[in-house]
Amino acid sequence: MSDNFDRQQTREPDAPDSSRLIALYESSCRHNASLPVYSCLGQIMTFAELDRLSRDFAAFLVTRLNLQKGDRIAVQLPNLIQYPVVAWAALRAGLIIVNTNPMYTARELLQQLTDSGARVLVMLARNQSVMETIISQCAVEHVITTHQEDMITPQPRINCELVNTTALPEALRQGAALPFSTASLLMEDLALLQYTGGTTGASKGSMLTHGNLFASMCQFNTAYPPSEERQDVVLNPMPIYHIYGFVTSVVMATAMGTLSVLIPDPRDIDRFIQIMCERPFTAIAGINTIYAGLMMHPDFDRINFDNLRYAIAGGAALMTSVAEEWYQRTGCHIYEGYALSETTSAACINTIGARQTGTVGKPVINTELKCVDLDGHDVKPEGEGELLIRGPQVMQGYWRAPQNSTPAIDEEGWFHTGDIAVLQADGFVRIVDRLKDMILVSGFNVYPNEIEEVVSRHPDVIECAVVGIPDEKTGEAVKLFVTTTSNVFSEDEIRAFCRESLTAYKVPKHVVVVEDLPKSTVGKILRRSLRTENTSA
């Protein structure tokens, strides 16, 4: 494989105004034509096959469905090889991708389809019943359905129940006979509507351009250059419909010439571990819950980590206990970063040459950071304040929501994250917590992340979450929710454990043992749900 590997795909194309993202993709497909780019469910797809299939689907969308530059196409798929085929087809045709969670209910799906105005939806055939109930209420004109095995079975099933529906294999067959030319695209053209996870309320569509995606790719490529000796093999369990997964699995895999191993369901730890045992890999992109879950599996120590160059974490805080155990058992550090839908993934990241535990690293290239107080005044280094970001990866605003865009991005181009951070004198960045998650106890600021970090070190704790609840004496009180391996877990015991590391007002006043904690589809614990459902002790 190393004999055919060409680093040329990572060079920046000489196309200052047009979409360098598309130029880079097409260049990468040419130079790495015979190399594998995706592996999933036993199927291998080469760069040449990806190039051909994405061209064919783009031709179908433009010629058969008459989609025009700027039209929206919603993609509601798990991590399957079909996803990048559809995504690159849409980007080459000048369409705007609307990443959509395949686990959405009819209400959630309708909200996103209505807000985006998507004309086409690509979805799993087994989810058609959800679409049947809402298709008359949205702008979707055509549905493309696919089965999980469509890229594996030579003659896949065609089973379309909705009106104006085409099976993906049929769309590809038709597109192969149609002409297609890549759309004329500029870096400022929209490429993606990435809806926020909704952890702070209603989901909003972050408008990301070709330039945003290209900038994110260049920033990551600088932080983690591809191997000079062989093709990198990256395990990608993060959902592609999430910005983290989209950048690592779609943008990075093709632009940097890596082989991306797609994990359709990372909750199936048995299968995930099996894949890790069967295939040598050089990198993994995950979150805290994934790394913790893998290490709890009895077969984890059977995995060969000799080729692992780096593991990255984002999406939620990386617990020190998880990071330390991972390093002890694998010999490889987890490099934590800080990413948002609004910043096309990463704004800060720890790198192999510059890492500091407990921080999210330093700003990626061409990115400025500052912290401000509640009055908007700059905070000095080492002081706490709201983190602001300015750089080429920052979104253009929220789709059809100027009332949200204006306060989020100020006149000077600073994006207000809503997160409290500390910019250390050495350049590393420490995230304290979300501004809206901060708890005010007797006038003192209490940050859930700090308490959760301490509690997670207890040997009987699996997961934990902290929220603030109303309290007559102190204004708010700290309430801890915890899942544990012990049947005799004691509130007094955990409080005593906390007192060893926390000042008195930070020690949880209320402790509740639960079977599970509410999580988003990417494994992020939803404190908002805990606050809503548990407003009293």
Image (cartoon, rainbow, N blue to C red):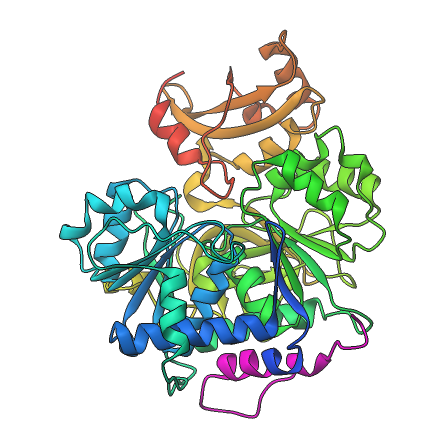
Residue at 66% across, 63% down: 259
Quarter of the figure that contains the N terminus: bottom right
Number of numbered discs on residues? 0
Left or right: 133 in relation to 376: left
Quick check: is 5 in the magenta stretch? yes
Q: Quadrant of the C terminus?
A: top left
Front-lying residue, 427 or 465: 465
Q: Nearer the viewer, residue 280 or 407?
A: 280
Q: Percent x, y for residue 210?
A: 44, 76
Q: Position of residue 53 (x, y in %)?
A: 48, 71
User: Can you see residue 335?
Assistant: yes
Whether 264 is drawn above or below 22: the answer is above
Vertical comparison of 389 with 153: above or below: below
Farthest-out residue, top: 488
For this orientation, the residue located farthest to the front is 155
Residue 351 placed where, x, y %?
Answer: 72, 61
Residue in the picture at 56% in, 28% down = 464
Closest to the observer, 342 or 378? 342
Q: Is residue 134 magenta?
A: no
Left or right: 116 in relation to 285: left
Extreme-left residue of the structure: 136
Determine if residue 391 is in view: no
- In the image, residue 519 lies at what x, y percent? 46, 35
Please state if 295 lies on the left or on the right of 371 as rendered. Answer: right
Region rendered in magenta: 1-27
Q: Residue at x 50, y 18 (%)?
A: 514
Q: Is residue 417 left or right of residue 68?
A: right
- Using the rendered view, name the quadrant where residue 178 is placed: bottom left
